[in-house]
Image (cartoon, rainbow, N blue to C red):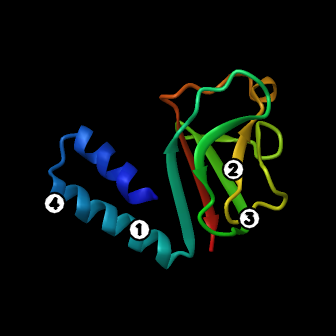
Amino acid sequence: MLAAFQRRLFHRAGFSSAQADRLVSALETTLASQGLHVVISLANATSADGDVASDTVLPSTPVGDVTVRVNGLEAELGLDCYFETAPPELGARLLWRGSAAGYQLDSTDVISFTYGV
């Protein structure tokens, strides 16, 4: 989930494979120790409300709130975007509501979900 995408980002930033592996491991350990799960993926290009924002699904059922970010900026869950299931659960996809967000997604946008486990 986080690991493969983060490794690619670290490689693009000039880190070696070994450095990228250590950084990803440290991030995952830190997040897990805080009871958090982070999923990062590239967005799908959207053109209409209700389009699937990402092919990545929730790998587990969240405990508590889910924070959704696009390119690091928080999207308002329930307004800008929503999950196929309410409340969000294992396997749910994120759907985008561009009319509320004020923009459609591009395939180069980065989406992240952060939630408790």
Which numbered disc, 3 or 4, marks the residue closer to the eye?
A: 3
Q: Which of the labelled discs sits on residue 18, or is there none?
A: 4
Q: Earlier in the sequence, mark 2 or mark 4?
A: 4
Query: Which amino acid lies under the numbered mark 2 shown in the image of this protein?
Result: Arg
Give residue 75's position: percent from left, percent from top: 69, 40
Q: Assign a secondary structure to mark 2.
A: strand
Q: Earlier in the sequence, mark 4 or mark 1?
A: 4
Give residue 33's position: percent from left, percent from top: 48, 78
Query: Which amino acid lies under the numbered mark 1 shown in the image of this protein?
Result: Glu
Which numbered disc, 3 or 1, marks the residue closer to the eye?
A: 3
Q: Residue at x 33, y 68 (%)?
A: 26
- Give how far apart the Cα atoms at labels 3 and 4 are: 34 Å
Contact between labelled residues 1 and 2, with CB atoms less than 8 Å apart: no
Say which residue label 2 marks: 93
Q: Which of the labelled discs sits on residue 116, or is there none?
A: none
Contact between labelled residues 1 and 3, with CB atoms less than 8 Å apart: no
